Image (cartoon, helix red, strand yellow):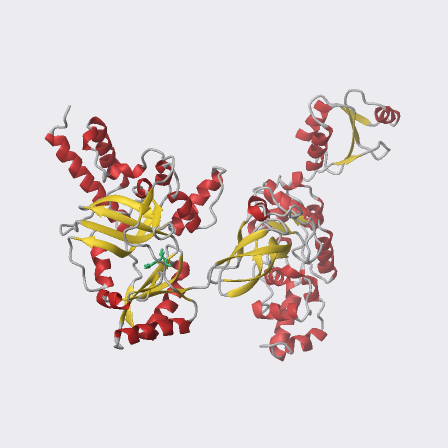
């Protein structure tokens, strides 16, 4: 059945509306319709086209979702070769470019169109009578690959030129790329779906454009930015490159928002500096700026030399990525105790500086990227951001590459490294004693809501630690009379301020248990928790002895906080620092415990023997230990309980001889419940 004229008209109207909206959304960044209404128009057009297939046009927006998979890409011979630009890396090369242009054009008022150099893939698009017909990659510059089907899925590229005065034929050159925000989202999705992540937006764009299945391409958020016209027939050429870009924008193409006009070499270099500064905050990756003589007649006069134009040059920024090898993987301890694996690298020049270290963020990241000592890696340094290892080069993996193992002890102070179940970051548990954390720990210790030592701020802590006057909080209380001289000798200090500080330190000695607990800087223990702990346990020693099970009886203390507290008090260095503080005279009035501190299991010794009906030996041990009990290997008079299962042997006999309490699994479970 032929489509009635109403359907023909409606399809045309829908195509127009959808493309206008696409343009407003993807080119102008000014959406005109709510997404739901857009979807409705789109589905209506899809329905019409499926009812009347003859209504489907090559430029229909429904084609943007991708057509049939291809066996291979066809070849396209470029009517006008796709040349490359000569590069400038240093200012004097820009100076030389400007001089050459002025000399060849025989005047000094050369105007330049300046724009970012997109870091994507060069593409050429052919339009006939306003409709997009063919799109191709650069290839070797003379022949490229036909990626028309994939390009149709690029949302900000007009499938039909807008406006009235359209050229009969038009060949537009530009760059296909992926915006950084889209790249991050795509990679997050790759990660959660277990697919391989892309190294950078450029690789992601290249991989997406070269998909043989256009439906896959359609799901990858590509963008096209126009920067030149190769051929145009049936329309008048403007006088300048800027005029040409305005014409393209009017036809519905996205062009660089950062494009500008300038004169003289100072103008070029200013633009280079300005865009260089804006580089980290641009929505896409760029690798330089491009200077182009603005007048098209002057471009023609300058012409080409070998395979590059003489009228334009790319002034490159320092590369942000480079290859190097991992010589070692070590860990660093931050001010908060966070332990970060760091790759020691063979020196490499990247992002404008020589880089020898790059962060690997955390243990999971090292595993995910599978970085090993000896690997060849891609290192990235963007702006002032800390250099990072982006990915390994898998093909260069050596047989003897060594995997990373997270140390169990802090490399700075030797305290136990802890990693809580819900956290990606491992931390040193020696907060009070670890030199890496000293400044932070002291500042917290002295802060108003903790020990409240007035006058002990940033600058002072810095000097006290750097001059090794104070190593642990107890040292503050040991300065005594000699401290006056030492303190008065520090920057920004005088006799009076030193005396005031010593008085404040002395006054802080008498405090409350809640403040003292908070001052210790235990991870996950804020002021409120410290207060709850003080109330619940009454005495510091009650708290020090509590296992995780008892800790969890405190309101709002769950397994994570309980683990933090118990790790902290299990670390001998921390206990020593606390003992020193008490010895130095820090005191508070101890109260009575409000909470229930007794437990059927805490402090009791168990021996396991025989096979229990449902629990393995390890499971039973974990449960007993989690409840604060101990599990010993042999039965003695000190044993409190023997848990016996099937085929229990000599241990059971001995327990009977000693008349110890013998439990079966269900009795053990009952005890654990109490
Ligand atoms: S103009 C005759 N403008 O850089 C060549 N190219 O090395 C005309 N590129 O393959 C190119 N941004 O892919 C021009 N604003 C821009 C550009 C740009 C990126 C790429 C392009 C070309 C390469 C030249």
In percent of width and height, residue 241 lies at: 24, 62
Q: Nearer the viewer, residue 475 or 253?
A: 253
Quarter of the image for residue 663 reads: top right
As drawn, 271 above or below 373: below
Residue 45 shows up from this direction: yes
In percent of width and height, residue 625 lies at: 71, 36
Q: Residue at x 72, y 33 (%)?
A: 621
Whereabouts is ligand 1, in terms of quadrant? bottom left
Q: Nearer the viewer, residue 454 or 95?
A: 95
* Location of the N terminus (image quadrant): top left
Q: Nearer the viewer, residue 276 or 359?
A: 276
The residue at the far right in this view is 657
Residue 424 shows up from this direction: no
The residue at the far left in this view is 5
Q: Residue at x 22, y 66 (%)?
A: 297
In percent of width and height, residue 388 lies at: 53, 55
């Amino acid at each position: 059945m032929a489509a009635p004229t109403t359907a023909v008209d409606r399809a045309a109207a829908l195509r127009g509306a959808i493309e206008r909206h696409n343009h407003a959304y993807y080119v102008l960044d000014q959406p005109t319709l709510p997404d739901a209404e857009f979807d409705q128009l789109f589905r209506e057009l899809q329905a019409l086209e499926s009812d009347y297939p003859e209504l489907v046009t090559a430029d229909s927006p429904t084609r943007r979702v991708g057509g049939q998979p291809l066996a291979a890409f066809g070849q396209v011979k470029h009517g006008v070769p796709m040349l490359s630009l000569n590069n400038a890396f240093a200012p004097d090369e820009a100076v030389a470019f400007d001089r050459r242009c002025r000399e060849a054009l025989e005047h000094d008022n050369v105007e330049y169109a300046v724009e970012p150099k997109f870091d994507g893939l060069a593409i050429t698009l052919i339009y006939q009578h306003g409709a997009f017909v063919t799109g191709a990659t650069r290839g070797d510059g003379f022949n490229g690959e036909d990626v028309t089907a994939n390009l149709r899925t690029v949302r900000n590229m007009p499938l039909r030129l807008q406006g009235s005065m359209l050229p009969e034929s038009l060949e537009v050159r530009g760059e296909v790329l992926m915006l950084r925000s889209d790249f991050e989202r795509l990679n997050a999705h790759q990660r959660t779906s277990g697919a391989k992540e892309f190294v950078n937006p450029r690789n992601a764009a290249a991989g997406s454009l070269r998909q043989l299945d256009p439906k896959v391409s359609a799901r990858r958020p590509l963008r096209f930015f126009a920067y030149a016209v190769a051929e145009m027939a049936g329309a008048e050429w403007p006088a300048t490159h800027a005029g040409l870009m305005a014409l393209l924008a009017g036809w519905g193409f996205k062009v660089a928002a950062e494009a500008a006009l300038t004169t003289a070499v100072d103008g070029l270099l200013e633009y280079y500096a300005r865009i260089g500064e804006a580089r980290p905050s641009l929505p896409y990756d760029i690798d330089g700026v491009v200077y182009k003589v603005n007048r098209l007649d002057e471009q023609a006069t300058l012409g080409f030399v070998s395979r590059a134009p003489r009228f334009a040059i790319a002034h490159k920024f320092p590369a942000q990525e480079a290859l190097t090898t991992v010589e070692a993987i070590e860990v660093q301890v931050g001010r908060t105790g966070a332990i970060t694996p760091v790759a020691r690298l063979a020196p490499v020049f990247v992002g404008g500086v020589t880089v020898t270290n790059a962060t690997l963020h955390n243990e999971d990241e090292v595993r995910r990227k599978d970085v090993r000592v000896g690997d060849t890696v891609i290192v990235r340094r963007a702006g002032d951001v800390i250099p990072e290892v982006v990915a390994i080069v898998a093909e260069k993996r050596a047989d003897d590459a060594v995997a990373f193992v997270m140390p169990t002890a802090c490399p700075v102070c030797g305290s136990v490294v802890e990693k809580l179940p819900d956290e990606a970051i491992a931390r040193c548990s020696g907060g009070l004693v670890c030199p890496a954390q000293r400044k932070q720990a002291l500042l917290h210790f002295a802060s108003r809501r903790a020990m409240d030592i007035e006058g002990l701020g940033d600058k002072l802590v810095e000097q006290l630690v750097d001059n090794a006057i104070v190593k642990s909080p107890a040292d503050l209380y040991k300065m005594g009379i000699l401290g006056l001289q030492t303190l008065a000798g520090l920057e920004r200090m005088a006799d009076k301020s030193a005396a005031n500080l010593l008085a404040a330190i002395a006054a802080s000695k008498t405090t409350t248990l809640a403040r003292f607990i908070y001052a210790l800087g235990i991870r996950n223990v804020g002021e409120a928790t410290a207060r709850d702990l003080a109330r619940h346990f009454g005495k510091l020693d009650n708290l020090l002895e509590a296992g995780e099970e008892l800790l969890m009886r405190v309101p709002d203390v769950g397994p994570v906080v309980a683990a933090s507290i118990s790790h902290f008090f299990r670390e001998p260095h921390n206990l020593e620092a606390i003992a020193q503080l008490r010895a130095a005279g820090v005191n508070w009035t101890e109260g009575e415990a409000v909470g229930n501190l007794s437990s059927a299991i805490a402090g009791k010794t168990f021996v396991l023997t025989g096979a229990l009906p449902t629990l393995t030996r390890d499971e039973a041990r974990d449960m007993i230990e989690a409840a604060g009990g101990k599990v010993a290997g042999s039965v003695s008079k000190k044993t409190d309980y023997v848990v016996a299962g099937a085929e229990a042997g000599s241990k059971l006999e001995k327990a009977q001889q000693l008349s110890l309490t013998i439990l079966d699994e269900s009795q053990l479970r009952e005890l654990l419940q109490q």
